[in-house]
Image: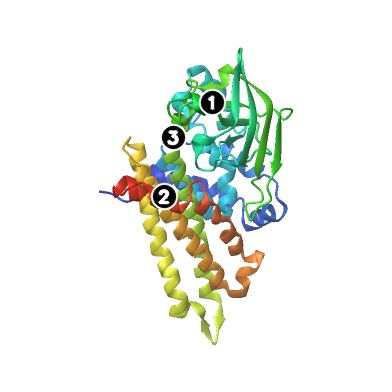
Amino acid sequence: MNFALSPEQEAVQEAVARICAGFGDEYWLQRDREGGFPTDFHQALARDGWLGICMPEEYGGGGLGITEAAIMMQTIAQSGAGMTGASAVHMNIFGLNPVVVFGNEAQKRRMLPPLIEGRERACFAVTEPNAGLDTTQLRTRAERRGDRYVVNGQKIWISTAQVAEKVLLLARTTPVEQVRRRTEGLSLFYTTLDRARVQVREIEKMGRKAVDSNEVFFDNLEVPVEDRIGDEGRGFEYILHGLNPERILIAAEAAGLGLVALERATRYASERVVFGRPIGQNQAIQHPLAANWMELQAARMMILNAAWRYDQGLSCAAEANAAKYLAAEAGFKACQQAVMTHGGFGYAREYHVERYLREVMIPRIAPVSPQLILCFIAEKVLGLPKSY
């Protein structure tokens, strides 16, 4: 059993880190203050082919696994880009997995290269105001009319919808009262986000100002039948295929953010002198940081375990959920401790750690709450009765 990264994986880490080095603290501080999608960062990764790291090589992708993608996403977050940098490219890594797995050849050749090359950006429209994690209760309708569907409804918390040209959309094509199971009757589409038929309203939020989150309203959006992925009514099944990789990548981002926060806190504790000695010499400062390191390393091991299992075609739902839970909690604790280690300066934007603390709430909350992960582990792993 070898726990070391392979030479190829180390090369991924080093190459991505070199790109990130061109976007330092001041760049991300400005993005946090002013907003505005980090297009130059997105394009820098696109130029070197990293946006398609997990996509098949025949469509311009890298043909690598979720393990390499997780290494990439941790490296981005750990560079100081945090969730802003990671979220700018996150959709490219896992988002079109349903197209790769369930799309036909014509769809793959039409849909994948523009995303991989950075010519198009996509948003992922699933969540609705009154459905939340209960995806089977989605109300957005896609009604078949000849050679197209007409979509009406509302989505919420849709990232990058302000700048995206495309949308991966889950909508109900058969009313829920007409299906045998609630998971049936939902269909998946990848189509143009026609601004004449779609209204996007940005949500002001706590952090990650540069990567927008939105309410999206569909008003008779016409979607060609050839933009439907797979069979009608099987969309819920298709998006499930991408949930475990998404959890693994979110976990990697949370771990990366926690690690950069720990690095900043450790450096400050070594340099800050009070009462004639570095504050890092005090156990009250040392011990929490040491605990942060251990928790983050344990989370990293679970992330790599989950990613390896996915890449090997093994079941990984428990490991992927556990990785997301452990990394989000460890990342949050590390970011919180980084602020506290800096004392009053931790509250100042110029030291960056307060931004890390605001951003780490994203992987802690999304795409699934820590409480639901605990419910999943209790039921699916421990065999306890379902609690919800």
Q: Percent from the top left, x then y, of residue 16?
A: 51, 46
* Sequence-wise first label, 3 or 1: 1
Q: Residues within 10 Å of mark 2 (few under 14, many from 20)?
A: some
Instruction: Identify the residue at horizontal 65%, vertical 68% (top origin).
Output: 348
Amino acid at circle 2:
Ile
Amino acid under disc 3: Leu
Q: Earlier in the sequence, mark 2 or mark 3?
A: 3
What number of labels is visible?
Answer: 3
The relative height of residue 160 versus residue 299 in the rendered view (above or below) is: above
Q: Is residue 353 above or below residue 7?
A: below
How many angstroms separate mark 1 from mark 2 (CA)?
29 Å
At x 43% / y 45%, what residue is drawn?
248
- Label 3 element class: helix
Q: Looking at this rendering, what residue extends furthest in the left direction?
A: 1
Q: Is residue 207 visible?
A: yes
Q: Quadrant of residue 111?
A: top right
Residue 170 picture location, percent across and down: 55, 31
Tell me which residue sits at (46%, 35%) in the image.
Answer: 54
Determine which of the numbered discs, if any, sits on residue 65 in the image: none
First of labels 1, 2 by sequence position: 1
From the viewer's perspective, tell me whether residue 9 is left or right of residue 352. left
Residue 170 in the figure: left or right of residue 26? left
Q: Residues within 10 Å of mark 1 (few under 14, many from 20)?
A: few
> Marks 3 and 1, Cα distance to the nearest angstrom?
20 Å
Q: Nearer the viewer, mark 1 or mark 2?
A: 1
Residue underneath mark 3: 240
Residue 213 locus on image (x, y percent): 64, 45
Mark 1 — residue?
A: 175
> Under tag 1, what secondary structure?
loop
Give the residue type that dot 1 points to.
Pro
Residue underneath mark 2? 373
